[in-house]
C-alpha cells in the first residue's frame, strides 16, 4: 500500500482511482522519456503493453491517440477500451470521439465500421450498432478473418436483441467453424446455439433441417432427442446413438453438461412470495391463479413458506410489495399480473428470481422470466400449424378493435418469419347488419356472381350456377370471442366455405362444453390449455351462485404452471432443451428474452364439443 503524508494527521492510503492514476503516470514517465522539444512518447522506447494491466494499457493508448492523432493509434486505443471488462463512461466517450474523428475513408472500411458498431453495442445503442455495422463486404481489404469473425458475432447479438431467432442461429452456426482456435469464444457460441434452438418455435426448428445451415440437421437432431428424453437413462441412450452418427460434430463438447442436467432437478427450497390482484377489477383472475399456485405448492411438497400479498391491481402497490419482498430475502416471487405492474417491477434495480405473469415490452434479464396466456401466442401457434400442414394462403377474419390489432400484428410477424404473408385480412364488426355481405365479398362470392352474369350476357344463355369461393385461399383463420365467432361461422356455411380448413384462437371455446350452443363451430381447430380436456367438465359455482375459480380453468392451470416453473428456473437455464408439461401447455424457456414459451394442446369441434386431437396419434 502506498501512503501519502497529511499535514493535518497521519498518513492515509491512496484511493484505488488515485493509485491507478499515479501508477499510470509512473509507467508513462518511466517508459517513455521525452527529449525536448518532442512532447509525444516514442512507441519503440515504450515497454511491451501486453505486460501492463488492461486499464493501464487503455489509459496509455488513449493518451497516445490524443497526442498523436493518427488512424492507427486511434484504432489501437479504441480496441483497448473495447477489451476492458468494465470501461468507464469517460473512456467510452474518448473512444467515441476518436472514432468520430477518423477520416471518412477509414470509418467506412469494414474494420472501421466494426469498431464503431462495437462501441455502440457497448453503450447498448443497438439501432446505431446495426447502422454502423452495415453489410458484409468480401472485397474490402480490411476484412481479415478476425474482422469477419467479430462482425458475425456482433451481427448475431443484434439479431438476438431483435428476436430474430432463426437468423441468429444461422449466423452463429456460420461463426462456429471460425472459433475452433478460441476455446472460450467457441464454447460460448455453442451454448448460444443451444439456447437459440430452444428459442425457435417448432415450425422454425423444422426449417433448419435441410436448409443447408452448417451442421444444422445434426444440431436439431440432438436437441429433439434430448428434449424427448424423460429419464437420465433415455437421455444417455439417445446421446450415445447420436454420437455414433456424428462422432466429430462440435456439439459433442456440450454433451457432458447436457446429460448432467437429466433428470431436471428442483431448485433449492425456499420461501415464495405471490403478488396477485385478489381484489379490484382483476380479483377474479387473481384468485383463479392463486388457486392453481396453491394446488401446485402442495403437490410440490410445500417446502418453504408461501407468502401471499394482494396488489389490488395497483402498479404502485405491486412495485412496493415487490421491493419489500426482495429486501426481506425471499427466494422467489410469482407475479404481479397487470401489465403496468409488471412493467414497474421489471424496471426495479434489484430483483429476486421472479416469474412475471405478463409480458414486457422489452426482453428481461435473469433472474426475471415472463409467463402469459395471450392472443398473440395463439396467433403464432396458428401460423405455425398452417405452415406445417402446407397451407400457405390464408384468409384472416378478425374483429375490429385492440384484440384484432394484437392478433393481426402477431400473425403477420409469424408469417414474415416464414417469408409468407396472408392472402387477405378482413376486419369486421360481428353485430354489423351487413356482415353476410362483408363475408361473402371476402370469400369472392360477389366476384363469382359477376363472372356468371358476364358469361350469361356474352353467351345469351340463361345460366344456373352457384357462385364459388375464391380459389386463391386454402384455409381460414377466424379470431374473436366465442360469441363473435358463433356469429361469423354461419355466414361461412351459407357461402359454402365449409370445405376450407378453419382455425381460431382459444377464445372460440368458452371453457365448458355445450353441444347445442357450439354446433356451428364443427371443424374449427384451435390451440388451448390441455387441462381443459383432461377433465369431464369445469365447475360453475357453489350452491349460492358464488363464482368458483374453476370458472376460469385456464388461469387455474396458469397458476399451477407458474409455481412449477418458478422452482425450476435455475435448472432450465443450465440446459435450455428441457420442457415442463403443465396444465396450460408445455413450456420451454427462451434464454434471450426471458419468456416462457408455450406449446399448446390442439382441439377440434366435433358434434358441437371440442375434442383433443394432438394425443395418441390423433393429430390431423
Image (cartoon, rainbow, N blue to C red):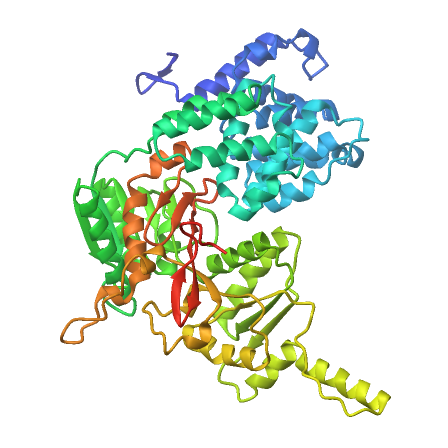
Q: Is residue 426 left or right of residue 9?
A: right
| Rendering coords of residue 516 (x, y %) | 36, 78
- Give the camera-side residue of 421 and 94: 421
| Rendering coords of residue 528 (x, y %) | 40, 59
- Give the camera-side residue of 407 and 593: 407
- Give the camera-side residue of 255 and 307: 255
Residue 95 drawn above or below residue 335: above
**Residue 185 visible here:** no
Q: Is residue 617 left or right of residue 10?
A: right
Residue at the (24%, 46%) spot, across then down: 325
| Rendering coords of residue 130 (x, y %) | 65, 43
The quarter of the picture where residue 457 lies is bottom right
Residue at the (21%, 52%) spot, across then down: 295
Q: Is residue 337 left or right of residue 614?
A: left
**Residue 65 visible here:** yes
Q: How many marks?
A: 0
Residue 563 drawn above or below residue 196: below
| Rendering coords of residue 601 (x, y %) | 41, 55
Position of the N terminus, as image quadrant, is: top left
Amino acid at each position: 500500500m502506498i501512503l501519502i503524508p497529511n499535514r493535518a494527521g497521519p498518513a492515509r492510503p491512496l484511493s484505488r482511482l488515485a493509485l491507478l492514476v499515479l501508477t499510470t503516470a509512473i509507467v508513462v514517465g518511466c517508459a517513455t522519456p521525452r527529449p525536448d522539444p518532442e512532447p509525444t512518447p516514442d512507441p519503440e522506447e515504450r515497454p511491451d503493453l501486453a505486460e501492463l494491466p488492461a486499464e493501464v494499457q487503455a489509459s496509455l493508448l488513449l493518451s497516445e491517440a490524443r497526442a498523436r492523432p493518427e488512424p492507427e493509434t486511434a484504432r489501437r486505443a479504441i480496441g483497448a477500451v473495447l477489451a476492458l471488462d468494465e470501461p468507464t463512461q469517460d473512456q467510452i466517450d474518448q473512444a467515441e470521439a476518436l472514432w468520430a474523428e477518423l477520416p471518412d475513408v477509414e470509418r467506412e472500411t469494414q474494420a472501421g465500421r466494426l469498431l464503431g458498431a462495437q462501441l455502440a453495442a457497448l453503450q447498448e445503442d443497438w439501432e446505431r450498432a446495426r447502422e454502423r455495422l452495415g453489410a458484409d463486404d468480401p472485397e474490402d481489404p480490411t476484412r481479415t478473418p478476425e474482422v469477419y469473425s467479430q462482425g458475425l458475432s456482433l451481427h448475431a447479438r443484434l439479431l438476438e436483441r431483435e428476436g430474430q431467432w432463426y437468423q441468429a442461429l444461422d449466423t452463429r452456426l456460420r461463426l462456429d467453424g471460425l472459433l475452433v482456435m478460441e476455446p472460450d469464444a467457441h464454447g460460448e457460441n455453442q451454448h448460444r446455439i443451444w439456447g437459440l434452438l430452444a428459442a425457435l418455435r417448432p415450425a422454425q426448428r423444422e426449417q433448419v433441417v435441410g436448409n443447408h445451415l452448417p451442421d444444422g440437421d445434426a444440431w436439431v437432431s440432438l436437441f429433439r432427442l434430448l428434449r424427448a428424453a424423460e429419464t437420465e437413462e433415455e437421455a444417455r441412450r439417445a446421446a450415445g446413438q447420436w454420437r455414433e452418427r456424428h462422432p466429430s460434430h462440435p456439439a459433442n463438447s456440450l454433451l457432458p453438461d447436457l446429460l448432467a442436467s437429466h433428470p431436471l432437478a428442483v431448485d433449492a427450497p425456499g420461501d415464495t412470495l405471490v403478488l396477485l390482484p385478489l381484489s379490484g377489477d382483476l380479483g377474479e383472475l387473481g384468485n383463479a391463479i392463486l388457486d392453481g399456485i396453491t394446488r401446485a405448492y402442495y403437490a410440490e411438497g410445500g417446502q418453504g413458506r408461501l407468502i401471499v400479498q394482494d396488489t389490488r391491481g395497483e402498479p404502485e402497490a405491486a412495485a412496493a410489495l415487490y421491493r419489500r419482498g426482495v429486501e426481506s430475502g425471499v427466494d422467489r416471487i410469482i407475479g404481479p399480473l397487470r401489465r403496468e405492474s409488471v412493467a414497474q417491477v421489471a424496471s426495479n434495480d434489484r430483483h429476486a428470481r421472479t416469474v412475471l405473469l405478463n409480458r414486457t415490452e422489452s426482453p428481461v434479464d435473469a433472474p426475471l422470466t415472463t409467463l402469459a396466456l395471450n392472443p398473440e401466442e395463439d396467433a403464432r401457434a396458428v401460423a405455425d400449424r398452417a405452415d406445417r400442414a402446407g397451407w400457405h394462403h390464408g384468409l384472416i377474419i378478425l374483429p375490429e378493435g385492440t384484440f384484432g390489432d394484437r392478433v393481426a400484428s402477431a400473425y403477420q410477424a409469424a408469417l414474415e418469419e416464414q417469408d409468407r404473408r396472408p392472402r387477405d385480412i378482413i376486419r369486421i364488426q360481428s353485430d354489423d347488419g351487413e356482415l353476410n355481405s362483408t363475408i361473402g365479398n371476402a370469400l369472392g362470392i360477389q366476384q363469382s356472381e359477376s363472372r356468371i352474369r358476364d358469361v350469361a350476357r356474352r353467351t345469351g344463355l340463361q345460366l344456373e350456377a352457384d357462385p364459388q369461393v375464391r380459389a386463391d385461399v386454402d384455409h381460414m383463420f377466424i379470431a374473436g370471442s366465442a360469441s363473435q365467432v358463433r356469429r361469423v361461422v354461419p355466414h361461412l356455411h351459407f357461402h359454402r366455405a365449409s370445405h376450407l380448413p378453419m382455425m381460431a384462437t382459444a377464445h372460440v371455446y368458452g371453457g365448458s362444453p355445450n353441444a347445442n350452443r357450439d354446433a356451428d363451430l364443427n371443424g374449427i381447430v384451435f390451440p388451448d390449455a390441455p387441462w381443459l380436456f383432461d377433465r369431464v367438465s369445469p365447475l360453475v359455482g357453489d350452491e349460492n351462485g358464488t363464482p368458483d375459480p374453476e370458472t376460469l380453468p385456464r388461469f387455474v392451470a396458469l397458476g399451477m404452471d407458474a409455481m412449477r416453473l418458478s422452482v425450476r428456473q435455475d435448472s432450465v437455464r443450465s440446459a435450455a432443451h428441457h420442457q415442463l408439461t403443465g396444465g396450460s401447455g408445455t413450456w420451454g424457456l427462451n434464454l434471450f428474452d426471458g419468456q416462457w414459451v408455450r406449446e399448446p394442446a390442439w382441439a377440434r369441434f366435433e358434434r358441437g364439443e371440442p375434442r383433443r386431437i394432438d394425443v395418441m396419434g390423433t393429430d390431423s
